[in-house]
C-alpha cells in the first residue's frame, strides 16, 4: 500500500480572486488510458467527473500522495515510477490548460521513489521526502524551487537516526517536522525535525512497540499548538496508535490504541475541525474489516467510528479533506462497484456518509490520496507582483502582519480568503502601511490587494 501526505492540512491553494465554487482535484494510482494513473476533477457533490491527465511512461507515472496547488497556481505532486532514471519524478500540472510536465527526475544519489507529495514554504520553495536514495539509501529530505527549477537534497537519512520517511514533513517556523517508518533506537521509526536555517537534523523521539510503531502518515499542528500523528502498527492492540508531541516541552504522549473492532492500521494523517475534533481513516478493522472513518477528541481521548464496507469502499489509505462547512472528503483504495475504490463525503454533524464516485478503471483505480479544492484559474491572475509592488511581513505569521504599499494609492481594497475561496476579512485601506490581524485558525490563506494599478495575490501561512 502506498501512502499519501499531509498536506499540512492542507495545502490546497486557491489563487483566483473571483468567488467561484471550487472543484475537487484528486489522483488515482492506477487506471486511466494507460493504466498508469490519472489526475481527475469533480464537483463536491460527485458530478462532473473528468479525467484531466492520464499518466504514461516514460514520463512520471503511478502518482503517490496528495496534490498541492502552489503559489504560482500550478498543481504539484510526485510519481513513484517513470522519469529519465526510472526513479520517479516531481511533476507540475496547469489546471487552466491541462498541461503536464515533469520538473525533476529523481535518482539514487538525490532521493528515490517518493511516496508522498510536497508542501510549500516561503519563497515558492517546495519540500518533500523520499523513503529511498541518498548517501545511505535510507531516504532524503529535499527542496525544489519552483521559480529557479533548483532541486536540493537537504539531508540523507540513516538507520541510526531514522530510516524511510513516507509522509510529507510540515513546516513550523523555520523547521520541518516529520516521521520515519523505521530506524532509530528501536528500529521502528522516529519523529524528527530539520532546521532550515542551520541545516540541522534532530531525532526528537524514538518510537517503541508499546506506544506504536511504523508511522506512515504526516504530522499536523493542532489548535493547541501540539503536533499530532498516528502509527500504523504496534501499541496495546497491535493496530497502531494516536500520539501528540509538544514542541515547547519536547514531550511525547501516547494517546490512543487502535484495535481490530473499532479500526486499525492507519496509513494517513489526522485533520482537525474548528470545533477541535480530529478525524482520520483506519485502513482495516471495524465490523466489516474494511476500515473506518473515525473521530478523536484530544481533550478527553474519546473515539467514535463509522464502519466502511465493500459497497461504500474499503481500505482507505489516504488523508481526509475538511471543507469550510465541516464536511469531510476522502477516498478508499478498494471496494465499490468495480472493486477499484471509491470517493466519498461525510457529514460528521449528521453522521451522513455519501458515496460520490466508484472508480472504474477509466477514471482511475486504487486512489491513495485525498482531494484539494481548486477554483477555476486563469492566466495572468495578478497584474502586480508582491515583491515589486507590495510587501507583507512577517510571513509566516502568528496572526498579526503588516502590508506595505510601495506605490501608495489612497483607498485600495484588501481581502483575505481561505483555501476554499471564502472571504475571511475585507476592508478598505487609506494608509501606506497597514497592520492586519488574522484571527482565523492555523493554515493557508490568501491576501488579495486591488489598487488602480492592478491586483496582487499573496499566500499567507498562519502558524
Image: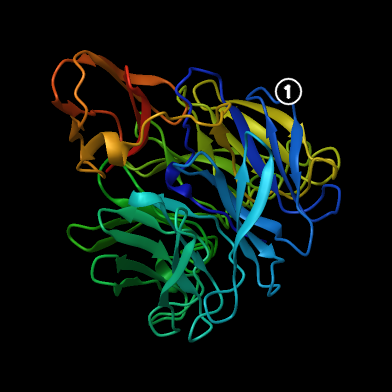
| Residue at figure coordinates x 44%, y 31% from the top left | 419
Q: Position of residue 60 (x, y in %)?
A: 70, 60
Image quadrant in which you'd find residue 161:
bottom left
In depth, the one of 454 and 134 nearer the eye is: 454
Residue 408 in the figure: left or right of residue 322: left
Task: Residue 215: tell me if it is visible.
Answer: yes
Which quarter of the figure is the C terminus placed in? top left
In depth, the one of 360 and 207 nearer the eye is: 360
Residue 443 in the figure: left or right of residue 33: left
Residue 441 in the figure: left or right of residue 383: left
| Residue at figure coordinates x 80%, y 46% from the top left | 340
Task: Residue 290: tell me if it is visible.
Answer: no
Q: Secondary structure at mark 1?
A: loop
Which quarter of the figure is the N terminus placed in? bottom right
The total number of labels drawn is 1
Image quadrant in which you'd find residue 102:
bottom right
Colouring style = rainbow
Residue 429, above or below 402: above
| Residue at figure coordinates x 42%, y 50% from the top left | 120
Q: Position of residue 218 (x, y in %)?
A: 46, 56
Q: Position of residue 187 (x, y in %)?
A: 46, 81
Residue linked to disc 1: 47
Residue 420, above or below 132: above
| Residue at figure coordinates x 59%, y 39% from the top left | 371
In depth, the one of 343 and 210 nearer the eye is: 343
Label 1 CA crowd tier, 10 Å (few <14, some 14–19, many 20+): few
Residue 335 in the figure: left or right of residue 457: right
Q: Position of residue 178 (x, y in %)?
A: 40, 62
Amino acid at each position: 500500500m502506498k501512502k499519501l501526505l499531509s498536506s499540512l492540512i492542507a495545502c490546497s491553494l486557491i489563487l483566483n480572486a473571483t468567488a467561484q465554487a471550487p472543484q475537487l482535484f484528486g489522483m488515482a494510482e492506477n487506471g486511466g488510458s494507460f493504466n498508469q494513473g490519472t489526475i481527475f476533477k469533480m464537483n463536491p457533490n460527485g458530478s462532473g467527473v473528468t479525467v484531466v491527465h492520464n499518466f504514461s511512461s516514460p514520463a512520471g507515472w503511478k502518482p503517490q500522495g496528495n496534490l498541492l496547488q502552489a503559489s504560482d497556481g500550478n498543481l504539484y505532486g510526485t510519481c513513484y515510477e517513470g522519469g529519465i532514471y526510472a526513479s520517479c519524478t516531481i511533476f507540475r500540472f496547469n489546471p487552466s490548460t491541462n498541461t503536464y510536465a515533469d520538473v525533476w527526475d529523481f535518482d539514487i544519489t538525490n532521493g528515490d521513489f517518493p511516496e508522498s507529495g510536497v508542501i510549500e514554504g516561503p519563497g515558492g520553495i517546495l519540500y518533500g521526502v523520499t523513503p529511498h536514495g541518498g548517501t545511505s539509501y535510507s531516504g532524503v529530505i529535499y527542496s525544489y524551487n519552483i521559480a529557479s527549477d533548483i532541486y536540493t537534497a537537504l539531508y540523507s537519512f540513516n538507520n541510526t537516526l531514522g530510516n524511510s520517511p513516507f509522509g510529507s514533513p510540515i513546516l513550523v517556523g523555520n523547521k520541518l517536522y516529520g516521521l520515519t517508518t523505521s530506524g532509530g533506537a528501536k528500529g521502528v521509526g522516529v519523529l524528527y525535525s530539520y532546521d532550515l536555517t542551520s541545516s540541522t537534523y534532530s531525532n526528537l523521539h524514538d518510537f517503541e512497540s508499546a506506544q506504536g510503531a511504523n508511522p506512515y502518515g504526516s504530522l499536523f499542528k493542532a489548535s493547541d499548538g501540539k503536533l499530532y500523528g498516528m502509527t500504523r502498527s504496534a501499541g496495546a492492540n497491535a493496530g497502531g496508535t494516536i500520539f501528540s508531541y509538544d514542541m515547547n516541552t519536547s514531550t511525547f504522549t501516547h494517546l490512543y490504541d487502535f484495535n481490530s473492532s473499532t479500526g486499525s492500521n492507519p496509513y494517513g494523517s489526522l485533520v482537525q475541525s474548528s470545533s477541535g475534533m480530529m478525524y482520520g481513516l483506519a485502513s482495516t478493522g471495524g465490523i466489516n474489516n474494511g476500515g473506518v472513518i473515525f473521530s478523536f477528541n484530544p481533550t478527553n481521548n474519546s473515539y467514535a467510528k463509522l464502519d466502511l464496507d465493500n459497497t461504500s469502499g474499503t481500505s482507505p489509505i489516504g488523508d481526509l479533506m475538511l471543507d469550510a462547512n465541516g464536511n469531510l472528503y476522502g477516498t478508499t483504495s478498494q471496494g465499490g462497484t468495480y472493486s477499484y475504490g471509491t470517493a466519498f463525503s461525510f457529514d460528521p454533524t449528521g453522521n451522513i456518509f455519501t458515496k460520490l464516485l466508484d472508480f472504474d478503471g477509466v477514471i482511475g483505480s486504487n486512489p491513495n490520496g485525498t482531494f484539494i479544492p481548486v477554483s477555476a484559474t486563469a492566466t495572468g491572475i495578478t497584474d502586480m507582483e508582491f515583491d515589486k509592488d507590495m510587501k507583507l511581513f512577517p510571513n509566516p505569521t502568528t496572526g498579526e502582519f503588516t502590508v506595505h504599499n510601495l506605490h501608495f494609492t489612497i483607498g485600495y481594497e484588501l481581502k483575505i480568503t481561505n483555501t476554499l475561496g471564502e472571504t475571511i476579512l475585507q476592508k478598505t485601506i487609506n494608509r501606506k502601511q497597514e497592520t492586519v490581524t488574522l484571527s482565523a485558525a492555523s493554515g493557508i490563506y490568501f491576501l488579495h490587494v486591488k489598487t488602480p494599478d492592478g491586483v496582487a495575490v499573496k499566500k499567507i501561512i498562519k502558524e
